[in-house]
Structure formats: structure tokens, C-alpha cells
Image (spheres, helix red, strand yellow):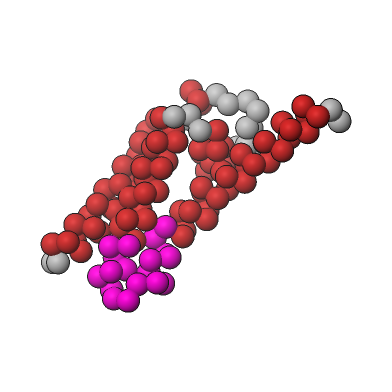
Amino acid sequence: MSRKKRRSAAQHRTIILLAWCHRYVFLIAAPLLPLLLARSKSDALAGMGVGMLCYGLYTLLGYLLRWKHIYCSFQSIAHVPMTPGNIRWHTIRKGDVYGVSAIFIVMGLAMILYRVVGL
């Protein structure tokens, strides 16, 4: 195998690993890690809000900046094999990207606001 093909295969593995981390690790850790580390219930809620807000913004930014691992993450969500070497952004529904991002951003802001206002 040539050096160029090995480098390309390694890049594809890295992109797929990042896509899995985006879909599973960060999605689960962002809201749950603050819950485990917080000293009080309200601090946990604010931490979960920050995590969800970050996840939503990261997903939206990744789509807008055309990060390959975000594309592969949405392929995984759609149960389509990941193709980091063949990126076709037009195949991802904008409603999915903007909808997922909006849900996490709104939920994150609501949790943070709830903590700040102290209802």
C-alpha cells in the first residue's frame, strides 16, 4: 500500500472516530457529566444546560463549516454507512441539522435561564 493511501485510510479512520464521538460520547457526556460532578441540583441543571448548549452550537458550527465528521455523524444517525472520502452535503436534510441544533440550544438556554432566574 502506498504512503498516500495509508495516510488517506488513517484520515478516514480518524474522521469516523470523531463522528462516533460526536454522536455518542459528547452527546451523552455533555448533559450527564455535570450531573455527576455537581454539588447541588441547581448547579447540575446549569451544567447540563451548558453542555447541551455547547453540543447544539458545535453541531451547527460543524455543519456550517463543513466538518467531515459532522457529515459522517449524520450519516450514522440515518443508518447509512459513513463515507468520509465521499462527502455530499446536499444529502443531509437541513431540517435535521437545524432542528437537532435548535433543540439542544433552546434546551440548554432554558436550563441556564432556569438556574439564573431561580424559579
* Image quarter of residue 118: bottom left
Image coords of residue 76 (percent x, y): 57, 42
Position of residue 92 relative to residue 103, above or below, is: above
- The answer to whether 46 appears left or right of 88 in the picture is left
| Residue in the foreground of this view, choosing between 70 and 10 | 10
Q: In this view, does 86 lie to the left or right of 10?
A: left
Res 75 seen here: no
In the rendered structure, the answer to whether residue 86 lies left or right of residue 39 reads right
The answer to whether residue 32 is magenta is yes
Q: How many marks?
A: 0
The image quarter containing residue 85 is: top right
45 shown above or below 40: above
Q: Residue at x 29, y 65 (%)?
A: 45
Q: Residue furthest bottom?
A: 39
Residue 114 location, x and y as percent? 19, 61
Q: What stretch is highlighted in magenta?
A: 30-47
Where in the figure is residue 92, as x and y percent of width and height? 48, 30
Question: Where's the C terminus, which quadrant?
Answer: bottom left
Position of residue 93 measured from the top left corner of the image (x, y, whole percent): 43, 30
| Residue 89 makes an appearance in the image | yes
Seen at 28% across and 62% down, the residue is: 46
Residue drawn at (56%, 43%) of the image: 19
